[in-house]
């Protein structure tokens, strides 16, 4: 399982190389991985019928971070959707982006995304889950901004990143609160614990934080605006990330935590309220858009709202509807997006108003679109119909707000029927339109995906017992928290849901008929809305952030190094000194009796060089005397048998002097700009720091609050670390994680210096 | 910046290979005797800095063959790679693994993940300092 999740990353590394070998067939070649993963995940199907499986892999047990994987119905539904749709997306991308100059880069990010997404839905550990969550945000950012030479694409990518990353931070807080409440970072244990979460003092905070994360990720109102803008990405990305998988991560997490957090009223009210609002907003905006990708994007927003609402309702029936709608939506929306890309590719326009009569030139695409759109509209005999009937049925007997939810849902359903007409009837029927390119049938690689997905929707619709027996039962059980008995069927007889469906169908078709005439009105309403809508709020916030950061940069990062030093030193030593005096008092014994004369010599050298460095007016002199100081420290290390430290100190001193000399030439002439008051203030802080550290070190010699761990290292260095140099064994073995962190910090510093030098150089080139 | 003194040129050419060999020596003996990746990396950077002072940044780039930031990346990747054996065998991260490769005769080479890690540190240190120095020298030239 570990390999299954990480294989995407490994293949991503190899992708550029494979691209050179495979050339045109790269899509088919890479698709072999998700295809085999799909089969692999299918092999778990029999196991999860009896309950969740926990596959354990240690990672950092000391920090409670593991790579344990939780395989149950819910995670398996997602894993199968990701790997299954991923297979066709990779094939599709090979055809869609054929000949693109950075196709290899595209595949690298796409495969990394797929692996992160699999990790997200399979992780059992909250921290690991969060890491994968953020990885999907980052890969999504890179994919939206894939055409990075396009200013608009970069802006949209940044917007998506800001919204989801801000939510991600809230989510992290939420997950930590959750772990504190449940006393564990393991999802399995959290879900299994029977303590009532909703009575805990942190419940409200945890719910709000988690929902901030999931709502931003799953584009709920008022954060929905980033998703349509994410359509700047190439179509395979939109089809995969922004309809079938990534945006469902938030929904996944809500469904996952539902058994644990769902008992509280806050949870269900938030989910139902925001979900229903999102559903209606999405449906309306989908109906009023003209770009085919925007239409689909907003209908995805509508679907995400619906899913959220169903989790909020939370009854057995609602969770069944949730799972069915989730599967149905992924199947038809993936298919429709890929077809939209094909239309764009073959006609040269995304504008629906310009497409018509394409069925003559693109007959296969027309047939597939019709099938997928039937599922979107919720019509028999496709799986979408079953999902919609279930949804209406569950809302009819929802415990709370039943009437309001029904009305909102029926209105949305009408609009969505209209949308289905927009994507399946408008482009393909009527008389031939005037498109920038002469349309012809899309290549095989671009049609296979939508065809297979639609076929699945059809088979699931005609034979609903198939998915029910293998997958859906277990999935519903894990989302609901207990086994649920249900039986899916295409025909339920004439009942309330069916009547509601009929009403929405007829109204929806009427809306579609009127679409062209309604356009001006819708357009006017939307442009008015965009001035006050959430997206305008986003831009206001971004402006505000720029202003605040400008202000605080001028305040804190004013560029005067002396002030930085002053603040750092004063605060550090002030706090440390205060704590020492307050808690421990000042007490030490000074024993100078057994010191040698050469130690006095070194001490004298130290003091003299420090004094000279601070008194001299020559920069070179000051650098040199700092060097002397460093060498004297190195000598001390060597005297007290720490050769490693001594050598390091010597080398670092040497290189520091070299670096300083390199910079020294660029500095202006030395002038004394500080006032006497400033110099006395600096002196006071310096003396305070010096006295504090001296007293502290003397005091430390006398006091022993904890057992020293150095004896452990001395004893175990050779038997456990196979090395006699204790310092090195500590660095590379016992405390290697610290060292790993340090080399990353080192690299960050190098990159920081590099970019500063580059920026400077660029500034100088400007006139 | 580039010095034109014959003495520095000759000395750099003589000393630099010695420094590099010494840095590798320090790197490999580090586990038992004073030395290690950090110190080795510092000595190696000293060698390249000397070369840069004598022959300029451009020549040093040429000598390094790869960009200094690639060295940095290589170091970080090696550091991360040393965590893989533990991960794949289901142990806590950074658990050390040791292998003994037999050589002809009765001797053998001790290989281990801490060694790989230490080599990573070596490259990260070298990469960092070369980024600093070459960056500073080039910004001066431009």
Image (tube, rainbow, N blue to C red):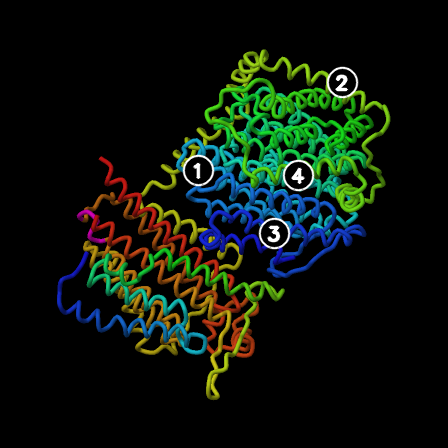
**Distance of label 4 from label 2 (alpha carbons):** 28 Å
Please rate how many residues cluster around mark 1, counting C-alpha atoms within 10 Å: few if below 14, some from 14 to 19, many from 20.
some
Residue A276 placed where, x, y %?
69, 26
The residue marked by circle 2 belongs to what chain? A
**Residue B86 is a magenta residue:** no
Residue A609 placed where, x, y %?
26, 64
Q: Is residue A189 above or below residue A294?
A: below
Which of the 4 image quarters holds residue B87? bottom right
Q: Is residue A303 above or below residue A140?
A: above
**Distance of label 3 from label 2 (alpha carbons):** 46 Å
- Label 4, secondary structure: give it: helix
User: What residue is pinned by disc 1?
Assistant: A147
| Residue at 52% in and 59% down | A584
User: What residue is pinned by disc 3?
Assistant: A128
| Residue at 57% in and 18% down | A431
Q: What is the number of the mark on residue A116?
A: none
**Distance of label 4 from label 1 (alpha carbons):** 28 Å
Label whose residue precedes the other's in the sequence (1 or 3):
3
Q: Residue furthest front?
A: A360
User: What residue is pinned by disc 2?
Assistant: A503
The residue marked by circle 3 belongs to what chain? A
- Which segment is the magenta one? A664-669
**Distance of label 4 from label 3 (alpha carbons):** 31 Å
């Amino acid at each position: 399982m570990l390999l299954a999740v990480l294989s995407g990353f490994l293949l991503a590394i190899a992708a550029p190389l494979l691209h050179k070998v495979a050339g045109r067939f790269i899509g088919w070649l890479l698709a072999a991985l998700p295809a085999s993963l799909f089969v692999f995940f299918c092999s778990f199907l029999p196991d999860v019928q009896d309950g969740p499986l926990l596959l354990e892999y240690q990672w950092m047990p000391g920090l409670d971070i593991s790579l344990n994987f939780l395989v149950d119905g819910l995670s398996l539904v997602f894993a199968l959707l990701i790997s299954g749709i991923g297979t066709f997306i990779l094939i599709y991308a090979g055809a869609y982006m054929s000949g693109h100059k950075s196709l290899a880069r595209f595949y690298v990010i796409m495969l990394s995304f797929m692996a992160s997404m699999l990790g997200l839905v399979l992780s059992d550990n909250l921290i690991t889950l969060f890491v994968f969550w953020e990885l999907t945000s980052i890969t999504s950012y890179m994919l939206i901004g894939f055409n990075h030479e396009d200013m608009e694409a970069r802006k949209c990518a940044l917007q998506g990143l800001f919204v989801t990353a801000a939510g991600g931070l809230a989510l992290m807080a939420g997950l930590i609160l959750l772990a504190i409440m449940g006393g564990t970072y393991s999802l399995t244990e959290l879900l299994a614990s029977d303590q009532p979460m909703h009575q805990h003092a942190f419940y409200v905070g945890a719910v709000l934080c988690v929902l901030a994360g999931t709502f931003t990720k799953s584009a709920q109102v008022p954060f929905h605006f980033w998703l349509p803008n994410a359509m700047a990405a190439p179509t395979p990305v939109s089809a995969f990330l922004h309809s079938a998988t990534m945006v469902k991560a938030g929904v996944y997490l809500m469904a996952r935590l539902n058994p644990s957090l769902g008992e509280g009223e806050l949870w269900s009210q938030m989910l139902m309220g925001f979900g229903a609002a999102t559903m209606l907003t999405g449906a309306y905006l989908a109906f009023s858009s003209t770009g085919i990708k925007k239409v689909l994007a907003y209908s995805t927003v509508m679907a995400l709202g619906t899913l959220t609402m169903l989790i909020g309702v939370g009854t057995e029936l609602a969770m069944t509807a949730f799972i069915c709608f989730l599967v149905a939506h992924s199947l038809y929306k993936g298919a429709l997006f890929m077809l939209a890309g094909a239309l764009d590719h073959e006609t040269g326009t995304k504008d629906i108003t310009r497409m018509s009569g394409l069925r003559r030139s693109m007959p296969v695409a027309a047939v597939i679109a019709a099938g997928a759109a039937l599922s979107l509209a919720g019509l028999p005999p496709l799986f979408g119909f079953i999902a919609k009937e279930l949804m209406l049925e569950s809302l009819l007997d929802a415990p709370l707000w039943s009437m309001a939810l029904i009305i909102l849902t029926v209105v949305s359903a009408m609009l969505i029927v209209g949308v289905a007409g927009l994507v399946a009837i408008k482009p393909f029927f009527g008389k031939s339109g005037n498109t920038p390119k002469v349309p012809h049938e899309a290549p095989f690689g671009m049609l296979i995906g939508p065809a297979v997905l639609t076929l699945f929707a059809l088979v699931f619709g005609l034979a609903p017992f198939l998915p029910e027996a293998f997958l859906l039962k277990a999935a519903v059980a894990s989302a609901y928290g207990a086994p649920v008995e249900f039986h899916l069927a295409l025909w339920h007889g004439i009942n309330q849901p069916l009547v509601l469906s009929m009403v929405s169908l007829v109204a929806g078709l009427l809306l579609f008929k009127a679409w062209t005439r309604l356009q001006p009105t819708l357009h006017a309403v939307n442009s008015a809305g965009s001035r006050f809508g959430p997206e305008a709020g986003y831009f206001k916030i971004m402006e505000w952030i720029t202003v605040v950061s400008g202000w605080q940069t001028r305040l804190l990062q004013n560029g005067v190094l002396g002030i930085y030093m002053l603040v750092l030193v004063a605060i550090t030593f002030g706090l440390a000194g205060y704590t020492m005096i307050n808690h421990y008092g000042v007490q030490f014994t000074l024993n100078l009796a057994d010191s040698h004369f050469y130690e006095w010599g070194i001490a004298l050298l130290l003091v003299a060089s420090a004094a000279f460095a601070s008194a001299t007016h020559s920069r070179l002199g000051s650098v040199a005397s700092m060097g002397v100081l460093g060498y004297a420290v190195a000598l001390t290390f060597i005297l007290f048998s720490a050769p490693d430290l001594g050598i390091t100190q010597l080398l670092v001193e040497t290189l520091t002097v070299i670096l300083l000399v390199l910079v020294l030439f660029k500095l202006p002439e030395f002038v004394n700009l500080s006032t006497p008051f400033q110099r006395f203030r600096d002196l006071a802080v310096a003396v305070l720091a010096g006295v504090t550290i001296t007293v502290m070190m003397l005091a430390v010699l006398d006091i022993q609050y904890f057992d020293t761990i150095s004896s452990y290292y001395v004893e175990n260095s050779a038997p456990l670390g196979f090395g006699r140099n204790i310092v090195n064994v500590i660095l590379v073995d016992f405390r290697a994680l610290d060292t790993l962190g340090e080399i990353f910090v080192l690299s960050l510093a190098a990159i920081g210096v590099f970019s500063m030098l580059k920026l400077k150089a660029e500034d100088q080139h400007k006139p | 910046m580039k010095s034109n003194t014959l003495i520095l040129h000759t000395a750099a050419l003589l000393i630099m290979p010695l420094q590099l060999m010494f840095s590798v020596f320090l790197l490999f003996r580090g586990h038992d005797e004073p030395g290690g990746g950090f110190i080795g990396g510092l000595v190696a950077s000293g060698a390249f800095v000397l070369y840069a002072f004598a022959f300029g940044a451009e020549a040093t780039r040429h000598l390094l063959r790869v960009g200094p930031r690639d060295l940095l990346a290589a170091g970080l990747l090696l550091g991360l790679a040393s965590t893989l054996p533990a991960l794949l065998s289901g142990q806590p991260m950074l658990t050390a693994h040791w292998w003994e490769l037999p050589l002809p005769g009765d001797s053998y080479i001790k290989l281990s993940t801490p060694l790989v890690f230490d080599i990573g540190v070596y490259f990260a240190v070298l990469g960092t300092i070369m980024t600093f120095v070459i960056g500073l020298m080039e910004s001066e030239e431009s």
